[in-house]
Image: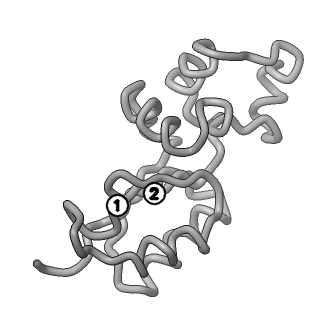
Amino acid sequence: MSGPAPVQIFGTKKCADTRKAERFFKERGVPVHAVDLAQKGMSAGELRNVAARVGGMEALIDREGARYVAKGLKYAAPTGPRIEQILVDDPLLLRTPIVRAGARATVGYAPDAWAAWLAAGTEGTEGPLR
């Protein structure tokens, strides 16, 4: 098997944590597929897939972000299925970075989790980082 499989990093160019996540993997020789949420959002299926691994849709919405406040969502406080629709419609409301590797995913800057993925390696799995 050739080198590690690429990780997907969803974020924005302005997000310092997204840039740190990209640097974390590149420094360790892991290819990165960066997705700029300002250009392309996640599909509803991708969102559900990640949400299932990080504790639900609630974990994906950035309730602290300026965009959340600017859109008046602080007072509307979306819940349940509305969160999914809002995140599909406006991916800039996502907490970033969202990092996906195989069946694993994290939200936010999580170098300890990523290091554990890398340490787990590929033995007995379908692919690297799984």
Q: Is residue 55 above or below residue 117?
A: above
Q: Is residue 112 above or below residue 84?
A: below
* Left or right, residue 110 beside residue 123: right
Residue 42 in the image, given as x and y percentages of width and height: 43, 35
Residue 55 in the image, given as x and y percentages of width and height: 60, 39
Mark 2 Cα-neighbour bin, 10 Å: few <14, some 14–19, many ≥20: many
Give the tally of numbered discs: 2
Q: Which residue is mark 1?
A: 33
Figure quadrant of the C terminus? bottom left
At 50% from the left edge and 74% from the top edge, which residue is drawn?
A: 116
Q: Is residue 71 above or below residue 68?
A: above
Q: Which mark is residue 9?
A: 2
Disc 2 vs disc 1: Cβ atoms closer than 8 Å? yes
Is residue 51 or residue 88 the one in the foreground? 51
* Left or right, residue 121 beside residue 37: left
Q: Which residue is outermost to the right?
A: 75
Q: Amino acid at mark 1?
A: His
Image quadrant where residue 126 sits: bottom left
Callout 2: SS: strand
Callout 1: SS: strand
* Left or right, residue 62 beside residue 98: right
Figure quadrant of the N terminus? bottom left
Residue 8 in the image, given as x and y percentages of width and height: 38, 57
At 30% from the left edge and 66% from the top edge, which residue is drawn?
A: 6
Residue 127 in the image, given as x and y percentages of width and height: 22, 64
